[in-house]
Image (tube, helix red, strand yellow):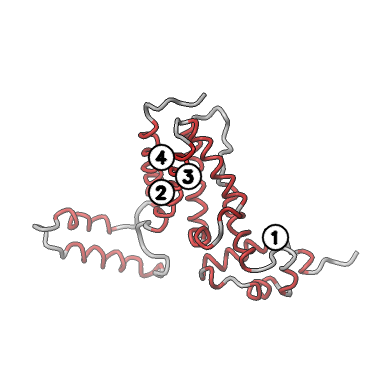
């Protein structure tokens, strides 16, 4: 049997992973069928078996990245435990794929099966917490945008700063804060000391998820819990 050609070996997952790499490194605008075909060593026509155009490709990428954001813990786990696991999975996906927030804005999320399933899972958990379906949808939206905000506002050195310049970046920020009038901005001057080292990003994201889920738990307290 003759060996398979590049086109025959091509899978939907392989196409999605290569497109995500481009999107993460260069932004969604850099993702084109022609560019993907060149990088995968196939003709553009070979990709049409999987994605007919860029819109369909972006939907497929979003569906691929969101696949692990689901309430798949044991049904006996409390709703906050399962909801937290979903938020953690969403943040992990965004940290691994910086283009995901832009993807979620660019596509019609109703056409993304894994996103619809994740929303449905969240609504079910929030109904167990005593919220109405409408309230649950508001909360699910809040959690989505809260996760996007956590990733967008993460502290520390920007990714485009070379590793050998991180120390200088920290020093400049420290000096900038230390130069503020302490009688007017005492807390900001004290904040300068936090720029002696890069922040613990895992701690930052855990703290942020605590804020998001803690707010939901606070609102749920005292509500009748669905059986």
Local crowd size for mark 4, using a 10 Å CA cut-off: few (<14), some (14–19), many (≥20): some
Q: Is residue 72 above or below residue 194?
A: above
Q: Secondary structure at mark 1?
A: helix
Q: CA distance from mark 4 to mark 2?
A: 12 Å
- 188 left or right of 222 in image: left
Left or right: 62, with 150 as reference point: right
Residue drawn at (53%, 61%) of the image: 103
Classify mark 1: residues with Cα within 10 Å, few (<14), some (14-19) or many (20+).
some
For the N terminus, the quadrant is bottom right
Q: Is the residue under label 3 in contact with that under label 4 (CB below 8 Å)?
A: yes
Q: Are marks 1 and 4 in contact (CB under 8 Å)?
A: no
- The CA distance from mark 3 to mark 1 is 26 Å
Q: Which residue is mark 1?
A: 12
Q: Nearer the viewer, mark 2 or mark 3?
A: 3
User: Pointer 4: what residue?
Assistant: 213
Residue 135, image x and y in percent? 44, 39
What element does badge 2 sit on? helix
Q: How far is disc 2 from disc 1 in space, using C-alphas?
A: 31 Å
Q: Which residue is mark 2?
A: 205
Mark 2 nearby-residue class (10 Å; few <14, some 14–19, many ≥20): some
Query: Relative to the observer, which residue lies in front, 99 or 215?
Result: 215
Say what secondary structure mark 3 lies in: helix
Quadrant of residue 210 within the rendered picture: top left
């Amino acid at each position: 049997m003759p060996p398979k050609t590049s086109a025959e070996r091509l899978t939907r997952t392989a196409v999605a992973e290569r497109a995500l790499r481009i999107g993460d490194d260069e932004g969604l605008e850099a993702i084109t069928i022609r560019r993907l075909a060149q990088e995968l060593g196939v003709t553009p026509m070979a990709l049409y078996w999987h994605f007919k155009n860029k819109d369909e490709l972006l939907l497929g990428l979003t569906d691929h990245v969101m696949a692990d954001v689901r309430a798949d813990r044991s049904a006996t786990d409390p709703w906050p435990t399962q909801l937290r696991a979903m938020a953690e999975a969403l943040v992990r996906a965004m940290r691994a794929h910086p283009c995901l927030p832009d993807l979620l804005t660019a596509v019609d999320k109703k056409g993304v099966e894994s996103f619809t399933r994740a929303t449905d899972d969240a609504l079910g958990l929030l109904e167990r917490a005593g919220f109405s379906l409408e309230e649950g949808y508001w909360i699910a939206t809040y959690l989505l945008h809260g996760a996007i905000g956590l990733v967008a506002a993460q502290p520390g050195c920007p990714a485009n700063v070379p590793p050998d310049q991180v120390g200088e970046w920290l020093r400049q920020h420290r000096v900038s804060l230390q130069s503020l009038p302490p009688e007017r901005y005492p807390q900001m001057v004290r904040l300068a000391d936090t720029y002696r080292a890069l922040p613990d990003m895992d701690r930052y994201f855990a703290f942020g998820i605590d804020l998001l889920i803690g707010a939901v738990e606070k609102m749920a307290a005292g509500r009748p819990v669905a059986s």
